[in-house]
Image (cartoon, coloured by chain):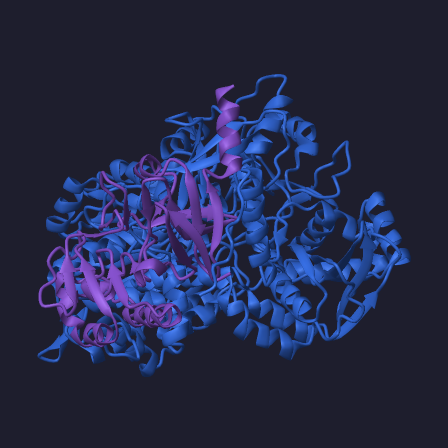
């Protein structure tokens, strides 16, 4: 029974429903309905993506569905599953469909979970982690046997992390359990759709009309941006005016701390008391939901948000997007712009506010990239992560015995693992089963044992702990911060790594106020507010999004081409001019650096344009080599564009420092023992299941039940250097926190070193000297620092250090 | 300085950077909380398979300490074994250790009654008016159990806590967490005195460290 007049693929009730809404189905929505196999839809925000993904399910439901699970919808955010549930409820009710739609996330209660195992809904809305958990149930074959469709939302975002690898492995298992399964991937605009289709294991690509070009420009501000910093507070009044002139504005800012500060800055100039909300990941779930609901109800005029709002929530009436700070990544900027103007056929409107002088360059470069329709390449490529595969094997072992050959065949049907070698697979299986140590210590206590040709858990009681540790998101250990000695008001959370770096008396910023660190007690950081003080230490944020390779290259090209300076504000042009006169301007193909003296110290600035994380690694490697060369480095600071190192002796010839072979050796030997690598290892060890974050019945006590993974890392490096997890850690260090791959790229593409020795601080280096987040060198000087600190305390306490008692 | 000398209850002691305590007057090397066999116990219980090298690493370190101090007597202050089964399964290594030095195993909460160990077993020892036991008690003693740690210059290090009545040793074993010296239990036992942080070298600090003391005075005013 088909409607032959307009849309032959739409069942009549659906056709009528569209008509009743006053809607015309988009061509790409109908294309999804026609797709015979798996499909990947590329559509801009507001293109009706999600409805397109569900159309085949709704069409089939019009003629009735059998009992059992029919469709799984997977999204990266729990909040999205809520939203989708609400949005689906309407057509389902209007069409009178007998469909049960339920969500299943970390928030779902145990009663509902248990019922879903016995009596699954027709449509299940879930996340990659919850899906993996369901695959660990022995009932999984029965639950998923009737499955016909999987809809993966925001697949471009999932593909960038290990969560995507986990989901694709889960999908391979689902295909095994339900061979008739069809998959629909929904993606925002990406540079390489084919790579994303390959990630899905192959799919027909459906492209939506990208819509009209966006109206995007820099926001005109009354003041010029400051030399350094990232807060954008100088533009608060200009942003306020833009908010007042629009219906609903989204203000995106790069970090949570900045969002807090900018939100305060906005309210300080909010003379008309416009309703403005705040949304970021450190806020309680309830607070975030309230803001989302108020937005949907049209009660807000603006929301200040971080990436927590980045993904496809339904943006209703947003008509302006303001990006504070350089976008770091062209693709993300384009996706954020797409938030503005929900109407697919009208141009979206967006304004960018650079936070400092360097960021003006990045913003201009980003605007040019948007105009040219250029996007960044995808951050991750190649083989799926092996630590995720280890976890997947352990997860499936909870569901039942495994045949190694069959599992290998199944795993290699997952896109990211299509080229997985049998040797790597066997290494992962061996790690899960025996620990994979050169010393075969666990023959009696293997995790998995081979019985009748099948791998199974030796101790079935282990299932509970394994299930509790499913997931690939490794959050940093957080400590809560409270005011005053006992039970004072909670102020927020800081990373344990940062807390460990504090000494009593240090001041830092949290929740928008300056506090003094007093002590750590029972894993609570006790502080005293210091309202008048400027913080001594900025909060260390761990992995920050680094400016993409493409955008960095554009910035470098812009600086190196005076003709292109036409597009820059006058004071920026003057700044570049001055740099060209005093020192040297960085240019594509060259590695520009300079050395100058100030206040008794020597400074070495390297304009590496490798992104924040790679520059931080570069800083560690260079200072290490400087120490070896007797230049006595004291510390360094890294931004997206440059590394600035201070030392007692000058760098007069940078060539030996930047020698690629030498840097590579440093990476192998010295950096391997560094904290950055230890953090990488911690994530790998957690995902692979070497350490368990959550234990059944674990109680909270002051005594650390678990010891530092650093000890495991050091032990493995000493006794078992070729262990699988060390191999994975080395591979990961090429990207992420260490991002060594970009240093390699930089050395390859910019072989010519240009070094100048200007008489004083240069215009480019001056902002770097104001940057927060300086990193002291902890090489040979570390022991001296400790001794000096201990001696100081003894002196201050009027105590004498006892004589060294030589034995 | 890989080791630091100090006095406790009128006796000379040496705190070694490794976390061991040497008592020259008794020619004794004292170590607490070796937790030998921890990785195997976790594996046995179906948990993660940790790198199985910690027993070897700990015993290697112990061999160096024994060699350098030429101690005649090794006293393990309890929790030498992560549990009693671990004590049995490590027979060879333990026999080798006991062949070279006289060993006293003091019972801990993890290994209350490890049977058939070579060497001597005891609930506690008494020497020169000082009790050696696993958990600090009423009288003046040398003990372990709490795995005390201290933060200094951004690092968290195992630490000796030296008070008037109690001397508490850091955990000597490799796979051991720890309790901050500021924890109420430890503050009650050693309200003031000195701390010797271990790690690459031994470092002496006053307890409480002065910056903390001034912060507290500031609040009282």
Q: Is residue A67 above or below residue A109?
A: below
Q: Is residue A741 above or below residue A438?
A: above
Q: Nearer the viewer, residue A624 or A227?
A: A624
The percent position of residue A656, horizontal first and vertical second, equals 72, 75
Q: How many marks?
A: 0
The percent position of residue A671, horizontal first and vertical second, equals 54, 68
The quadrant in which residue A546 appears is: bottom right
Name of the residue lying farthest toward the top: A272
Q: Nearer the viewer, residue A326 or A711?
A: A711
Do we see residue A666 in this rendering?
yes
B51 left or right, relative to B149: left
The percent position of residue A373, horizontal first and vertical second, equals 63, 58
The percent position of residue A10, horizontal first and vertical second, equals 32, 51
Do we see residue A178 in this rendering?
no
Q: Is residue A517 above or below residue A419?
A: above
Name of the residue lying farthest toward the right: A581
Image point (79%, 71%), residue name: A653
Image point (38%, 46%), residue name: B161
Q: Nearer the viewer, residue A97 or B212?
A: B212
Image point (80%, 61%), residue name: A595
Q: Nearer the viewer, residue A121 or A358?
A: A358
A709 left or right, relative to B126: right
- Among the chains pictured, the one given blue colouring is A
A563 left or right, relative to A365: right
The quarter of the picture where the C terminus of chain A appears is: bottom left
Q: Colour of chain B?
A: purple
């Amino acid at each position: 029974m088909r409607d032959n007049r307009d849309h032959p693929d739409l069942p009549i009730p659906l056709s009528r429903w569209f008509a009743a809404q006053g809607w015309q189905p988009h061509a790409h929505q109908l294309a999804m309905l026609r797709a015979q196999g798996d499909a990947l839809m590329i559509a801009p925000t507001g293109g009706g993506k999600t409805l397109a993904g569900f159309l085949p399910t709704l069409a089939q439901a019009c003629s009735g569905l059998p009992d059992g699970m029919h469709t799984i919808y997977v999204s990266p955010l729990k909040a999205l599953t809520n939203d989708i549930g609400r949005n689906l409820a309407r057509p389902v009710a209007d069409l009178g469909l007998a469909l049960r739609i339920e969500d299943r996330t970390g928030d779902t209660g145990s009663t509902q979970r248990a019922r879903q195992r016995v009596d699954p809904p027709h449509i299940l809305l879930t996340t990659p982690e919850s899906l993996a958990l369901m695959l660990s149930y022995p009932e999984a074959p029965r639950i998923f046997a009737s499955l016909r469709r999987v809809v993966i939302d925001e697949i471009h975002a999932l593909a960038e992390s290990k969560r995507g690898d986990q989901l694709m492995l889960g999908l391979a298992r689902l295909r095994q359990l339900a061979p008739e399964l069809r998959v629909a991937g929904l993606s925002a605009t990406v540079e390489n759709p084919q790579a994303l289709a390959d990630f899905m294991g192959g799919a027909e690509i459906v492209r939506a009309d990208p819509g009209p070009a966006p109206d995007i420009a820099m926001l005109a501000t009354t003041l010029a941006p400051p030399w350094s910093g990232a807060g954008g507070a100088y533009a608060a009044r200009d942003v306020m005016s833009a908010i007042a002139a629009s219906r609903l504005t989204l203000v995106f800012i790069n970090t949570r701390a900045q969002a807090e500060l900018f939100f305060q800055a906005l309210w300080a100039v909010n003379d008309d008391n416009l309703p403005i909300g705040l949304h970021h990941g450190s806020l309680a779930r309830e607070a975030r939901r309230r803001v989302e609901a108020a937005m949907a109800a049209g009660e807000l005029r603006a929301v200040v948000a971080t990436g927590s709002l980045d993904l496809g929530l339904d943006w209703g009436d947003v008509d302006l997007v303001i990006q504070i700070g350089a976008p770091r990544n062209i693709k993300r900027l384009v996706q954020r712009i797409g938030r503005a103007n929900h109407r697919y056929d009208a141009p979206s409107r967006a304004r960018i506010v650079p936070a400092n002088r360097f960021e003006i360059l990045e913003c201009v470069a980003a605007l040019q990239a948007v105009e040219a329709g250029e996007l960044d390449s995808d951050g991750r490529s190649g083989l799926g992560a092996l630590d995720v595969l280890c976890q997947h094997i352990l997860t499936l072992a909870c569901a039942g015995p495994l045949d190694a050959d069959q599992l290998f065949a199944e795993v290699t049907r997952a896109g990211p693992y299509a080229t997985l070698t049998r040797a790597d697979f066997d290494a992962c299986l061996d790690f899960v089963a025996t620990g994979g140590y050169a010393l075969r210590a666990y023959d009696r206590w293997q995790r998995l044992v081979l019985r009748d040709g099948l791998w199974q858990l030796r101790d079935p009681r282990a299932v509970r702990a394994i299930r509790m540790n499913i997931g690939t998101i490794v959050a940093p250990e957080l400590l809560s911060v409270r005011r005053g000695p006992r039970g004072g008001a909670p102020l927020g959370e800081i990373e344990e790594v940062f807390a460990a770096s504090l000494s009593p008396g240090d001041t830092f910023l949290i929740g928008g106020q300056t506090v003094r660190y007093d002590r750590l007690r029972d894993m609570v950081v006790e502080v005293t507010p210091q309202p008048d003080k400027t913080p001594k230490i900025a909060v260390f944020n761990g992995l920050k999004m680094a400016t993409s390779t493409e955008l960095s290259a554009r910035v470098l090209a812009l600086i190196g081409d005076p003709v292109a300076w036409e597009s820059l504000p006058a004071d920026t042009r003057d700044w570049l001019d001055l740099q060209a006169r005093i020192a040297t301007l960085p240019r594509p193909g060259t590695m520009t650096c300079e050395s100058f003296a100030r206040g008794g110290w020597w400074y070495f600035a390297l304009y590496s344009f490798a992104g924040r994380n790679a520059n931080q690694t570069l800083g560690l490697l260079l200072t290490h080599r400087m120490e070896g060369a007797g230049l006595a480095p004291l510390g360094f600071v890294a931004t997206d564009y440059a590394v600035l190192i201070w030392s007692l002796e000058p760098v007069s010839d940078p060539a030996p420092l930047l020698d690629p072979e030498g840097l590579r050796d440093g990476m192998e030997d010295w950096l391997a023992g560094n904290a950055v690598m230890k953090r990488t290892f911690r994530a790998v060890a957690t995902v692979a299941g070497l350490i368990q974050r959550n234990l059944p019945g674990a109680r909270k006590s002051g005594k650390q039940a678990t010891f530092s993974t650093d000890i495991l890392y050091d032990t493995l490096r000493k006794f078992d250097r070729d262990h699988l997890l060390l191999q994975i850690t080395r591979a990961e260090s090429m990207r992420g926190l260490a991002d060594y791959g970009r240093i390699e790229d930089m050395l390859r593409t910019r072989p010519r070193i240009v070094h100048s020795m200007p008489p004083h601080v240069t215009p480019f280096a001056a902002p770097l000297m104001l940057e927060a987040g300086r990193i002291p060198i902890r090489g040979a000087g570390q022991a001296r620092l400790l001794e000096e600190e201990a001696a100081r305390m003894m002196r201050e306490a009027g105590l004498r250090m006892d004589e060294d008692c030589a034995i | 300085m890989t080791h630091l000398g100090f006095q406790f209850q009128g006796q000379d002691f040496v705190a070694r950077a490794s976390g061991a305590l040497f008592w020259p007057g008794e020619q004794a090397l004292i170590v607490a909380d070796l937790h030998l066999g921890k990785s195997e116990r976790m594996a046995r219980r179906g948990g993660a398979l940790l790198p199985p090298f910690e027993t070897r690493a700990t015993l290697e370190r112990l061999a160096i300490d024994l060699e350098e101090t030429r101690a005649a007597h090794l006293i393990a202050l309890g929790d030498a074994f992560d549990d009693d089964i671990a004590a049995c399964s490590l027979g060879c290594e333990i026999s080798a250790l006991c062949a070279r030095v006289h060993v006293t195993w003091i019972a801990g909460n993890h290994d209350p009654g490890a049977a058939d160990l070579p060497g001597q077993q005891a609930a506690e020892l008494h020497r020169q008016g000082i009790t050696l036991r696993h958990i600090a008690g009423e009288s003046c003693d040398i003990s372990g159990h709490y795995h005390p740690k201290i933060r200094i210059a951004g690092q968290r290090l195992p630490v000796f806590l030296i008070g008037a009545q109690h001397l508490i040793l850091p955990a000597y074993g490799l796979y051991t967490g720890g309790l901050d010296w500021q924890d109420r239990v430890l503050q009650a036992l050693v309200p003031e005195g000195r701390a010797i942080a271990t790690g690459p070298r031994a470092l002496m600090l006053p307890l409480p460290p002065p910056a903390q003391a001034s912060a507290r005075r500031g609040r009282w005013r």
